[in-house]
Amino acid sequence: MPMKPASLDDLLTSLTEAAHRRGLNDAQWAAGAGLPKETLSRLRRRTDCSLSTLQALASAAGAHLKVALFDIPDITSDGHMPTRVDRAYESELLRVCASGSLDPGQWRAVGPQYFMAGLATMLASAREFDRRGLLELAETLHPGMTNPEVFAAWLDRSPVRPSRFLPMVRAAISKATGVRAGEGARPRPKSKKQS
């Protein structure tokens, strides 16, 4: 099963737990990483940091950082669509769609740009999503995708059915936020720089 990309907050939460399991408080953990405690406090309010800082914190907590790759399924000969969407790939698609991210890089990493642009356009059709942001994302990924004819062609070819996929995205958002869809579960858009 694919792993979701960790945010800095996710990584720091996991590393904090590891440090605390080793009996380290924040000051001891930061010192073990060669950092002032204030640096650790500042990191918890940021969305990014250097890899060397993360590696030092991981080492001091008795952990290590790891990159986990997921498989993108075979794509059509024109490079536009996955030939199939199995459960593992579907989970990865749900993760990016439910994340609220509008970062084209995150979307490109999950599948062919044409296909991902269609997913963004599909999400934009549901009222609880950031329509403007998703349509801009779709146009960035594949210029012309928001044209009704182009999107209709996408719908005809896509292995993802909106009637099944949109409720799954809503459920993923509800699970992540603890709020049922339609009750304020709209994912907060993340700027391109924030993601």
Image (spheres, rainbow, N blue to C red):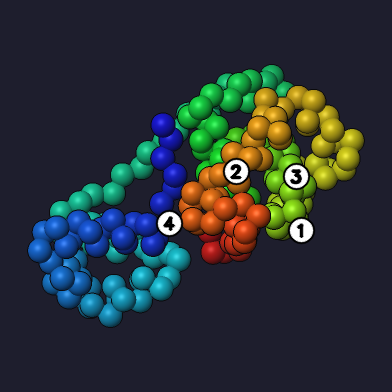
Q: Determine the residue positioned at 41% across, 73% down.
A: 45
> Are the two marked residues, 1 and 3, in contact with CB atoms closer than 8 angstroms?
no
Residue drawn where x is 43% and y is 35% of the image: 2
Disc 2 designates what residue?
A: 169
Secondary structure at numbered mark 3:
helix
Which amino acid does the dot numbered 2 rest on? Answer: Val
Secondary structure of the residue carrying numbered label 2: helix
Q: Is residue 64 left or right of residue 85?
A: left
Report, in whole angstroms, how far the alpha carbon at label 1 lies from the one at label 2.
Answer: 18 Å
Q: Is residue 84 above or below residue 28?
A: above
Residue pointed to by mark 3 = 121
Which quarter of the figure is the N terminus placed in? top left
Q: Is residue 140 visible?
A: no
In front here: 174 or 143?
A: 174
> Residue 117: percent from the left, percent from the top?
71, 42
Rendered location of residue 110, percent (x, y): 56, 38
In the drawing, what numbered circle is on residue 7? 4
Q: CA distance from mark 2 to mark 4?
A: 20 Å
Q: Residue at x 88, y 40 (%)?
A: 148
Q: Which residue is mark 1?
A: 132
Comes first in the chain, label 3 or label 2:
3
Q: CA distance from mark 3 to mark 4?
A: 25 Å
Which type of secondary structure does the marked residue at label 4 adopt?
loop
Q: Report the side of 54 relative to 25 (left or right).
A: right
Residue 113 at x, y = what percent? 67, 38
